[in-house]
Image (cartoon, helix red, strand yellow):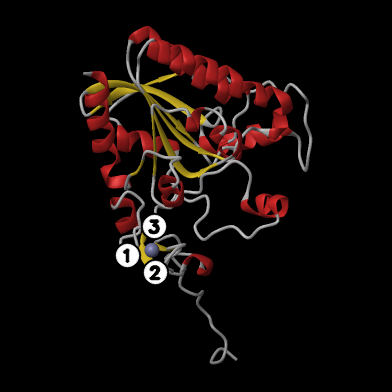
Amino acid sequence: MAWFKRDKKAIDQPTPPEERRVRTEGLWVKCDSCRAIVFRKDLEENLLVCPKCQFHFRMDAKRRLEMLLDGKWTEHDTGMVSTDPLKFVDTKPYSKRIKDAQKKLGMNDAIITAEGQLNGKPVICCAMEFGFIGGSMGAVVGEKVTRAIEMSIDTRQPIIIVSCSGGARMMEGTISLMQLAKVAAALGRLDDEKLPYISVLTDPTTGGVTASFAMLGDLNIAEPGALIGFAGPRVIEQTIRQKLPEGFQRSEFLLEHGFLDAVVHRKDMKGFIANTLDLLMS
Ligand SMILES: [Zn+2]
């Protein structure tokens, strides 16, 4: 019966049904602090700071350098790759973990060394990348920081290191711990040369990075609300058997207790560093 059966073929669908939904995913972001729903574009234009409560979202290394440096910069020591000296395996092999991170982020390890200008002043600036195995410091990060400090000495330029790290890279065991001494020794030489080192601590800066270069700046400045510490709060509570005070290990608490020199809002960071360099270099 032709009346009930369709003779002609259905009209071709220009898009398959699964693609007909309106894509809103990723356009909006929920603030981790005040729970406000923020338009992603507004957040990005506001340097990843919540416009409602000023919560500082984590910023990747590349964007950090774009924020701090004027225009283009020269990147150094890009080719250094971890050799996986312990052939370490946990839930997956460390070598695979590195390869995955390299593929995801398009960088070889958890730090970028840049030589550029900050408000017209030549500087060396390192920025750590938390997305790369928690911004952990293995042999590559330690060596790159050391070389950046040595470059700062050779070229008589001040150095700025922006930390964002969970600490030493446990997959490299004692080799990652040796970086602490190496970097600290290089900073000692920088100090002899009377060149300034400004350490910028962002959320989070913990473990071996706090225990070495992050706390050794001529000036240690942090972003608001950043978690900064050595061991985590639970470990400390269990060790000292005491309840920790409110806001413990946050920038503001550390400033109040003399561990930091300043807490600076992200939008003021570049200007603040430029003024500091003016004072220290003149
Ligand atoms: Zn907020």
Give neighbour class at mark 3: few <14, some 14-19, many 20+ (Cα, 10 Å). Answer: some
Q: Which mark is residue 52?
A: 1
- Quadrant of residue 209 in the image? top right
Give neighbour class at mark 1: few <14, some 14-19, many 20+ (Cα, 10 Å). Answer: few
In this view, the residue in front, 8 or 79, is 79
Quadrant location of ligand 1? bottom left
Between discs 2 and 3, the one toward the N terminus: 2
Mark 3 CB lies closer than 8 A to ligand 1: yes
Which secondary structure lies at badge 2? Answer: loop
Residue of label 2: 36
Residue 228: percent from left, percent from top:
51, 44
Q: Confirm or deny contact between disc 2 and disc 1 (CB under 8 A).
A: yes
Quadrant that contains the N terminus: bottom right
In the rendered structure, the answer to whether residue 230 lies left or right of residue 56 reads right
Amino acid type for the residue under numbered disc 1:
Lys
Separation of marks 2 and 1 at Cα, in angstroms: 7 Å
Query: Measuring 30% from the left and 61% from the top, which residue is drawn there?
Result: 51
Q: Is 153 placed above or below 132 here?
A: above
